[in-house]
Amino acid sequence: MRKEMSKSNEELKKIEMLIKQEYNEIPNHKMIGKTLRMKEGDARFFYPGTKKVIQMVKRGSVDGKLYYVVYGDGKYRYELFLVPAEDFY
């Protein structure tokens, strides 16, 4: 039970950090306009293994990671999502 609580607390801290950090756009990044296949992602918004055109690239101000901005799938196909670059092949 204690292990589950600490994992739950870690997830909450991670989500809080992701919400609070700023995502700074990197204009003219070489990946903008490239098509990549998703290897991971939230199944509510993306079909497994779909190809996505990178619309924009941003870097997190706290974690320093790259994020790609892509359109979702299905009913979310007109909405943009911020997805960690590591979730792509």
Image (spheres, rainbow, N blue to C red):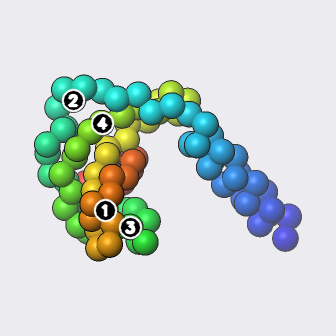
Q: Amino acid at mark 2?
A: His
Q: Say which residue label 3 marks.
A: 45
Q: Say which residue label 1 marks.
A: 72
Residue shown at the point (56%, 33%) measured from the top left: 21
Tag 3's secondary structure?
A: loop
Q: Position of residue 59 (x, y in %)?
A: 40, 31
Q: Is residue 78 above or below residue 44?
A: above
Q: Position of residue 76 (x, y in %)?
A: 33, 66
Q: Amino acid at mark 4?
A: Val
Instruction: Please report contact status of discs 2 and 4: CB closer than 8 Å, yes or no.
Output: yes
Q: Say which residue label 2 marks.
A: 29
Instruction: Please report contact status of discs 1 and 2: CB closer than 8 Å, yes or no.
Output: no
Q: Say which residue label 4 marks.
A: 57
What is the spatial separation of the Cα atoms under label 1 and label 2, in whole angstroms? 21 Å
Give the quadrant of the C terminus: bottom left
Tag 1's secondary structure?
A: loop
Q: Amino acid at mark 3?
A: Phe
Tag 4's secondary structure?
A: strand
Residue shown at the point (66%, 54%) measured from the top left: 11
Q: Earlier in the sequence, mark 1 or mark 4?
A: 4
60 or 5: nearer the eye? Answer: 60
Give the quadrant of the N terminus: bottom right
Q: Amino acid at mark 1?
A: Gly
What is the spatial separation of the Cα atoms under label 3 and label 1, in whole angstroms? 5 Å
